[in-house]
Image (cartoon, grey):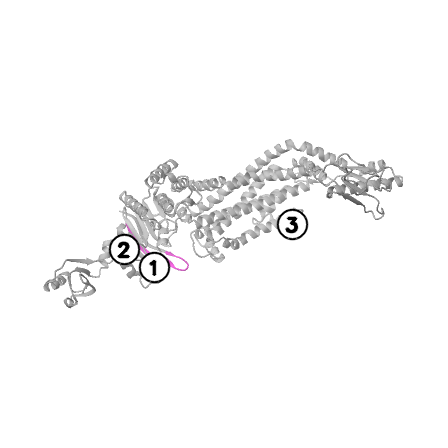
């Protein structure tokens, strides 16, 4: 026991002290936060400077209704301007409304390209002006229309209450559950590969360095294998823990500076563009989500995540260790031997992504029971609520599963780690695995 | 007292009988040579002695009791033929780690590492990584980690390969030192001149079986072929006799082989009778190399053996 502890300590410390670990641990959350807030911030603050646009040859339909705003666009009905002298007179562009208005295609001249946003904005203004014009023509008051649409848009919402076993109502947010489930499923998928491959490389290193024989003369092969697997599991947990702490610190720091402005702007934009402002709608949704986030049972999700991360990792890590033990020097051998192990992981991922919107479908329930796929699939189901007996069964099967794979892998590992020269075939590995001690 | 007794050890693999009924004993404090061509079963035998493999049949008695790997490996130091160290680890930490795995406490290990590092002039290496060491340097480190926990039984597989003569002598002296202090050394090699120099007791294995067992002197005597060297100036007409057969004839020296009913005195009488002055007369014992080549010749492994000698 003392020896396995020494091995765990070494495996853990050499990895945690490694520069790559420090970089990935500290940079990833920062990069992620920068990416999320940066893109949101850019979307908000990327206002182009005020554009002055001269309008010429107006047939009269737009003059009354084409509104300037002080932020982005001003329209100036100036009869002295034409497409040759607008720049000299201080305009950014000149809009010629001379064309046949039945074709609904006008020309705008500018020195620089206007950009999609500006062009869209001008088109929206023209549409609005045309709409107002038509309303007046047909005798409908603009205020009447506005008040009707104000009442009707977003007038009704549906609140999905799920009856839990205890008969209590629980408010759910399907989208949030989807997001959390998907996120944790992906995280388990990625970490299983990262840390599984780390175990395999560690075993290969020991074998090709020929340290394995020295080690095996001091400790049992099983201790050496488990020490490595547990040491790397500790590295994984450390990394998660640091990520959670860092993300919490960073998000509180960032939200102390940005959100008031961000929310303000989101509100502004909403007022300015009642119809179809993609960004502002997203921000509103995010703010709304922030409120429902507290409804999610985070404690359950995080503890299940840790369980399924460890369970799934232990289930596959010993298999990765066994693969690492039969490989000689050539990493190409690893590729082909890894396929039978990576296939179920990828399969689980595909099941999860293609059925996530039906968390209680038959395939999801089955896949969340079988240890080969359960860590990924069950994690995706948990946020939407899983019957307790299913959760317990899945956990018990996973624990039994990793006992079995560890037992199996240890026997392959014990023989493989000291075998040099020829590559072991699957048949041989199975023979090692199932022969009596 | 015998530190190790092997009784009818057998280890069969799917394709071959790696060790097929081998027994021998090793005396405490001796330097024991385990010899044999490549593929003879030496490594398998050593792996059974170090507890890496379990024998299929037979028993190992260590220090008078049945060998119990989980307990007894703390008293064994094993340096495999293929050296192995963690490349990215610092040298000091590596030595400390391996010593702790052998059951030494941290302070105890530190103290012993320091002594050995001073002895081998390695103090300045502590924070270097193994990948920065030359082959000879890492060999020395490997040797230190093998003997650090003061094992009763030290097993060295080709300990001198890759060492320059100075470092080889350093290690050789340490081996003698360890034996003098009561440790037993098992020394596995193909290099016969080292065996003649170092080992008191040898065993030769070939194709999984033991074909030779005894002290160097015993074995040489056992395989002597009644060959003598005679220092005298002779010419061909002096040598017409049935007492001996001339193997090599030089102007001032004769190598001759006695016919089996002759004695050395017959030879001397023969030359004295001819009034030829004799400067020297001594027996030529076969070298271990010759004995081994003779013994394993004809087996497929022998060709390999000769190539590597």
Mark 3, residue position: A354
Residue B159 among magenta residues = no
**Which x, y percent locates residue B155?**
33, 48
Q: How many angstroms separate mark 2 from mark 1 (CA)? A: 23 Å
Question: How far separated are the C-alphas under marks 3 and 1?
Answer: 63 Å
Residue occupying the point 48% across, 55% down: A430
Give the residues drawn in magenta, as a range: B11-26
> What residue sits right under mark 1 in the picture?
B307
Left or right of B111? Residue A159 is: right
Residue A59: which quarter of the image? top right
Label 2 secondary element:
strand
* Same chain assignment for discs 3 and 1: no
Q: Is residue B20 magenta?
A: yes
Tally the numbered discs.
3
Mark 1, residues whose alpha carbon is within 10 Å: few (<14), some, or many (≥20)? few
First in residue order: circle 2 vs circle 1: 2
Disc 2 + disc 1, Cβ < 8 Å: no
Residue placed at 50% from the left, 43% from the top? A232
Q: Chain of mark 1?
A: B
Answer whether residue A379 is visible to the viewer in this image: yes
Q: CA distance from mark 3 to mark 2?
A: 71 Å
Q: Is residue B172 left or right of residue A373?
A: left
Q: Which residue is mark 2?
A: B213
Which is more toward the observer, B99 or A271?
A271
């Amino acid at each position: 026991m003392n020896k396995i502890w020494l091995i765990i300590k070494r495996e853990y410390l050499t990895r945690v002290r490694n520069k790559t670990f420090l970089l990935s641990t500290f940079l990833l959350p920062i990069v992620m936060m920068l990416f999320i807030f940066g893109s949101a911030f850019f979307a908000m603050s990327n206002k182009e400077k005020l554009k002055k646009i001269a309008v010429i040859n107006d047939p009269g339909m737009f003059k009354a209704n084409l509104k300037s705003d002080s932020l982005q666009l001003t329209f100036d009905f100036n009869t002295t301007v034409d497409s040759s002298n607008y720049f000299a007179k201080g305009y950014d562009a000149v809009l010629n409304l001379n064309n046949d208005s039945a074709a609904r295609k006008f020309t705008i001249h500018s020195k620089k390209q206007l950009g999609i946003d500006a062009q869209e904005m001008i088109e929206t203004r023209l549409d609005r002006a045309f709409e107002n014009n038509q309303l007046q023509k047909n005798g409908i008051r603009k205020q009447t229309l506005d008040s009707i649409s104000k009442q009707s848009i977003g007038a009704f919402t549906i609140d999905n209450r799920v009856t839990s076993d205890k008969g209590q109502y629980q408010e759910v947010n399907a989208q949030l559950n989807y997001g959390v489930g998907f996120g944790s499923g992906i995280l388990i998928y990625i970490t299983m590969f990262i840390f599984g491959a780390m175990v395999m490389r560690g075993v290969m290193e020991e074998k090709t360095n020929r340290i394995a024989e020295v080690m095996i003369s001091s400790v049992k092969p099983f201790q050496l294998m488990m020490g490595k697997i547990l040491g790397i599991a500790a590295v994984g947990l450390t990394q998660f823990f640091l990520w959670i702490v860092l993300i919490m610190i960073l998000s509180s720091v960032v939200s102390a500076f940005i959100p008031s402005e961000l929310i303000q702007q989101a509100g502004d934009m909403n007022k300015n563009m009642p119809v179809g402002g993609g960004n502002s709608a997203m921000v509103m949704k995010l703010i709304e989500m922030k409120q429902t986030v507290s409804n999610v049972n985070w404690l359950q999700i995080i503890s299940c995540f840790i369980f399924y991360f460890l369970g799934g990792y232990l289930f596959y890590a010993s298999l990765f260790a066994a693969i690492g033990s039969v490989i000689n020097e050539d990493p190409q051998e690893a590729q082909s031997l890894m396929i039978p192990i990576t296939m179920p992981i990828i399969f689980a991922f595909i099941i999860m992504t293609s059925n996530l919107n039906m968390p209680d479908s038959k395939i999801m329930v089955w896949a969340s029971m079988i240890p080969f796929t359960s860590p990924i699939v069950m994690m995706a189901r948990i946020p939407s609520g899983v019957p307790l007996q299913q959760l317990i069964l899945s956990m018990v099967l996973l624990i039994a599963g990793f006992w079995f794979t560890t037992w199996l892998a240890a026997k392959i590992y014990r023989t493989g780690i000291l075998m040099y020269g020829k590559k072991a075939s699957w048949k041989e590995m199975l023979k090692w695995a199932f022969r009596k001690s | 007292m015998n530190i190790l007794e092997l009784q009818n050890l057998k280890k069969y693999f799917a394709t071959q009988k790696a060790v097929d009924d081998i027994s021998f004993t090793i005396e405490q404090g001796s330097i024991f040579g385990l010899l044999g061509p490549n593929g003879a079963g030496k490594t398998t035998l050593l792996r059974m002695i170090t507890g890496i493999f379990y024998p299929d049949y037979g028993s190992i008695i260590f220090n008078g009791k049945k060998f119990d790997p989980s307990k007894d490996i703390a008293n064994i130091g094993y340096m495999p033929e293929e050296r192995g160290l963690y490349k990215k680890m610092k040298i000091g930490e590596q030595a400390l780690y391996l010593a702790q795995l052998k059951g030494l406490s941290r302070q105890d290990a530190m103290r012993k590492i320091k002594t050995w590092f001073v002895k081998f002039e390695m103090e300045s290496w502590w924070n270097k990584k193994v990948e920065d060491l030359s082959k000879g340097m890492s060999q020395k480190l490997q040797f230190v980690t093998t003997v650090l926990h003061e094992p009763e039984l030290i097993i060295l597989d080709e300990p001198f390969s890759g060492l320059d003569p100075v470092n080889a002598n350093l290690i050789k002296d340490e081996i003698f030192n360890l034996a003098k202090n009561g440790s037993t050394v098992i020394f596995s090699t193909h290099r016969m001149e080292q065996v003649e120099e170092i080992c008191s007791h040898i065993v030769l294995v070939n194709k999984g079986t033991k074909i030779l067992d005894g002290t160097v002197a015993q074995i040489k005597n056992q395989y002597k072929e009644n060959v003598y060297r005679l220092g005298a100036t002779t010419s061909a007409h002096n040598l017409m006799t049935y007492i001996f057969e001339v193997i090599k004839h030089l102007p001032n020296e004769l190598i001759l082989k006695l016919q089996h009913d002759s004695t050395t005195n017959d030879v001397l009488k023969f030359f004295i009778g001819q009034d030829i002055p004799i400067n020297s007369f001594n027996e030529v014992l076969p070298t271990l190399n010759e004995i081994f080549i003779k013994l394993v010749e004809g087996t497929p492994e022998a060709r390999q053996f000769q190539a590597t000698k």
